[in-house]
Image (cartoon, coloured by chain):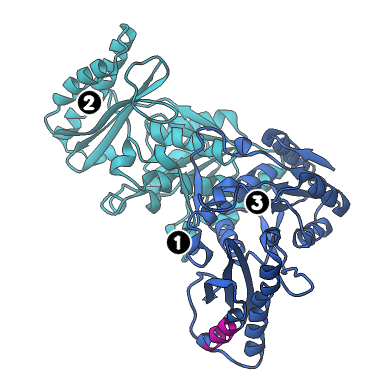
Chain colours: A blue, B cyan
């Protein structure tokens, strides 16, 4: 395994592999890898000649009052985990390499980037689309792997790939959870013990939605009310949003007669957790 | 020569050529081809195995009160001219093919897209960047050719290619002019005979700037004043802007001690003409 920090060097490697007819699988991450990331790497390892994991805490997807500075980083542990998982290349540029002086071009995902998480994080998905497009152009993957936990991110990137006519297959991998159901996230380390305990209520709400749907319930308001009851059990939680939306345009759905995304974001103090499930 | 209207078909052709190691030269146009376009095609023909000319009047780069509907179109004449010039493929999708229902992703060039022409045409360069990136992804050129007449467009696209880490060489080809100096443009057909006669004053202003610069003048205000005097001779002209700016950020320059773009846009009635030169 090698670690590449330089865009030109990464680009040259990718060009060579592509010319040799080798398939490249990309797992874009912000590092501090957990089993969720490793499930993406394992999927990539099974389906591609070359596996590249990018590790880049992307400043353009953090708002001015968000946790860019304190976002957890541990390159040593990440390298060891990637090596063990069979990654060929870690691409780990710094911010100056990705956004040099005079940088000015951004990819705007449009209205779907302003819904759900986009309400409290208005520039987040612009940053995500921009950095992922840059990574796609630098690394030229045939396949790219994303986690279902970031459901809106995946749907927006799928839209970007279609809209910009990119020849890349996106793969959405299931949410990986802790033993008690909390979705694995690099941000879970921010939680106090008490918050951590209450954070299982997000999964409780997800399960409640799935139970009701399996039992035949199709009214969004009924499902959302039952989920709210679950979340209310977490006294430290402040719900940012809890919605049932269409998977293509992320607009609210009243009656569930097609595939929908059930998604939520919940604050514990300044820590913001997300969880979701797809029904239909 | 073949004409391709379908994105997937074009993409398959490009993929095959790239796999065969063939270089593709792209000349993106809105059709109604004139000698300016043909000079780009000739350059592409000399430097690539395959030459693709796209013909697409891109709705996303026209503002609501601009000339999208009446922009001149003549596919028959364009095909004949491309065939004669040795083009291999005309890629001519329709708007529905390029912007299907639910389309939402746009490439934003940032501040340099809001200067010069961007003041009166605020969404223009967003549309240009978006369509050109789509064409790049569909056609996968090694080289792409643009005219110096659209000086701001070229500088913005060069910035986009660098920012988004695209592996494409952009070529800027000289302005091609009518015998009396008017820069060739598909929009020249809009001019009345009287406007057409006075439109030569744009080139007179360009020449004046070049003369003064050659004679040692380095003060922008002095050069701009002399250019204004030339433009004032066109009684039907209304100047949109006349500026001397840095070529990287398009901000005004007072003293010319580096490469600058001298650029103007002038209205004759509702017809808007542009011209420019680079000094330094």
SS class of the residue under badge 3?
loop
Q: Is residue B211 left or right of residue A217?
A: left
**In front here: A193 or A200?**
A193
Residue B31 visible somewhere in the drawing: no
- Which of label 3 and label 2 is nearer to you? 3
Disc 3 target residue:
A71
Residue linked to disc 1: B96
Kindly identify which chain the residue marked by label 3 belongs to.
A
**Cα distance, mark 3 to mark 1?**
42 Å
Q: Nearer the viewer, residue A174 or B213?
A: A174
Q: Residue furthest right?
A: A84
Q: Nearer the viewer, residue B3 or B126?
A: B126
Q: Position of residue A266 (x, y in %)?
A: 58, 69
Residue A261, image x, y percentages: 58, 75
Quadrant of the rendered structure where residue B202 is? top left
Start-end of magenta stretch: A222-229
The picture places residue B64, in percent across and down from the top left corner, at 29, 54
């Amino acid at each position: 395994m090698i670690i590449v920090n330089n865009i030109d060097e990464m680009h040259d490697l990718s060009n060579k592999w592509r010319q040799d007819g080798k398939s490249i699988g990309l797992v874009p991450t912000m590092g501090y890898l957990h089993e969720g990331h490793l499930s993406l790497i394992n999927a990539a390892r099974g389906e591609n000649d070359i596996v590249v994991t990018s590790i880049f805490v992307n400043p353009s997807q953090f708002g001015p009052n968000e946790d860019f500075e304190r976002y957890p980083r541990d390159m040593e542990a990440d390298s060891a985990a990637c090596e063990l998982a069979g990654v060929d290349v870690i691409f780990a540029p710094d911010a100056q390499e990705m956004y040099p002086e005079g940088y000015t071009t951004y990819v705007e995902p449009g209205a779907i980037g302003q819904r759900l998480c986009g309400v409290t994080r208005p520039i987040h998905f612009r940053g995500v689309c921009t950095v992922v497009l840059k990574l796609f152009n630098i690394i030229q993957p045939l396949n790219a792997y994303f986690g279902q936990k970031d459901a809106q991110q995946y749907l927006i990137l799928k839209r970007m790939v279609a809209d910009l006519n990119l020849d890349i297959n996106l793969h959405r991998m299931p949410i990986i959870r802790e033993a008690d159901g909390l979705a694995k996230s690099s941000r879970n380390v921010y939680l106090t013990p008490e918050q951590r305990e209450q954070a299982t209520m997000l999964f409780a709400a997800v399960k409640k939605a799935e139970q009701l749907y399996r039992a035949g319930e199709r009214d969004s308001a009924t499902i959302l009310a039952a989920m709210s009851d679950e979340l209310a059990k977490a006294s430290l939680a402040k719900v940012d949003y809890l919605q049932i939306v269409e998977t293509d345009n992320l607009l609210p759905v009243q009656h569930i007669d097609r595939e929908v995304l059930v998604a939520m974001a919940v604050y514990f103090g300044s820590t913001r957790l997300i969880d979701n499930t797809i029904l239909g």
